[in-house]
Amino acid sequence: MIREIFWLRSIACLCVVLIHSASIMINKMYIETDASLEKGIWTSLLLLLMFATPLFVFISEFLIAYSRSVKSPKTFLWKRMKYILFPFIAMAVFYALLSSVTGKHALSEFGQHLWENLILGKFHGYFILIIFQFYLLHVLFQRYGQKWSWKWVLAASLLINAAYLGYFSFVRTFDDPYSEYQVWWLPFLGWIFYFSSGYYCGRYFDQVKGFLISYRRWIWAGTAFLACAMLFLHHSGVITIMSSKRIDVLLYAIGMIFSLFAVAVQIKSVPRLLVTISQYSFSIYLLHIFFLMCVSKAFSLLFPALHQPVLLLAALFVGGVCLSWGGAYLLRKLPLSEYLIGKLGKDLPKEENPAVNKKAPQGREFATGEQV
């Protein structure tokens, strides 16, 4: 079991909830044309969190490549269909129904919303459609890519990813509402550098771990520079879209992934809270938008005239995380719940984590070679 992944997965989960919480807060507290310093600070925070979805792509491929478990492509894909694709379908139906009930035309629009969710990924579950493309790509990597040079693959995937995002950021315009998701958002080419980075980091984790420890200060400095460059491009109006599909997010996200990894490899324990969030991360991801809507509505009813962005953001974030975890905990008591909200993630063995097992030797090195 790789201890560092619990840090990365829990941080990614919390950042996704924080992104959507901040987006709701900004939309409620500020008008679209507001150019105040206060709004600029919040949008900067939002932009700095855009590494979260790329981090999930990286983690997903990292774990598969590390375990080298794809001996039977049919078994590999079927297992992920049951516990990832089936929950995606369940949530696509749920959020389509929710959109219909809260919309102007009630259930008459359910079919349209369901089509958009299932096929176009026009809800936050779009990430699962991207991940499944990479599951198929991983099978091909395992079969044909073993002899490829990792340097050439990483260089090629970076160029393809950058060219793809650059084209749709600066050249291509969309004539209909579906093109954005069909051509720009969902295809794996817009995320392929995160996939290839996760693949080779998983295959050569021991070497990568040594690299992260040796060059951690350079990695942190480089990431800080990329963050500043990204904020400059945004506030100067060069790239104004607020999305993880910005071309300048590409290198920044990789920098953040390696920066967090460089911190995690030096920490000898994982707090029990983060282990729990990591275990429930997929369920929290699926459910949190619903609970954010509930918290937002409740806040508006209780404090209709209150303009406190920090208070609203805190309520949304804490409420989104806690209610999603609580909802997932209760739903897991139902039969077949793993097909609705996914399986519970693996726990960190107590003997490998002093934060969980107080009797474990504190100076002991942790094993990282166990199958994931």
Image: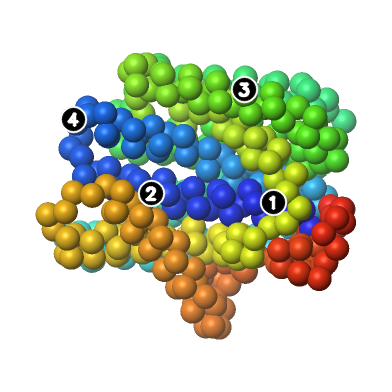
Q: Residue 351's image quarter?
A: bottom right
Callouts 3 and 4 close, C-beta under 8 Å: no
Residue that appears at 53% across and 43% down = 52
Q: Which of 253 and 219 is in front in this view?
A: 219
- Is residue 99 placed above or below 206 in the rendered structure? below
Which image quarter holds the C terminus?
A: bottom right
Count residues near mark 4 (Cα–Cα under 10 Å), then give few for <14, some for 14-19, many for 20+: few
Which label lies toward us, 3 or 4?
A: 3
Q: Position of residue 22 (x, y in %)?
A: 35, 46
* Left or right of 53, for residue 152: right
Q: Residue 360 carries which label?
A: none
Residue 83 visible in the picture = no
Q: What residue type is labelled 4?
A: Thr
Q: Residue 33 carries which label?
A: 4
Q: Where is residue 257 in the image (x, y as percent from the top left)?
A: 63, 37
Count residues near mark 1 (Cα–Cα under 10 Å), then give few for <14, some for 14-19, many for 20+: some
Q: Distance from label 3 to label 4 (Cα)?
A: 33 Å
Q: Residue 5 carries which label?
A: 1
Q: Which of 284 and 118 is in front in this view?
A: 284
Dot 2 corresponds to which residue? 20
Callouts 2 and 4 close, C-beta under 8 Å: no
Residue that appears at 48% across and 19% down = 229
Which image quarter holds the N terminus?
A: bottom right
* Left or right of 189, for residue 114: left
Which label lies toward us, 1 or 3?
A: 3
Q: Which amino acid does label 2 sit on?
A: His
Callouts 1 and 3 close, C-beta under 8 Å: no
Dot 3 corresponds to which residue? 222
- Is residue 174 placed above or below 84 in the rendered structure? above
Residue that appears at 64% across and 60% down = 271
Q: Earlier in the sequence, mark 2 or mark 1?
A: 1
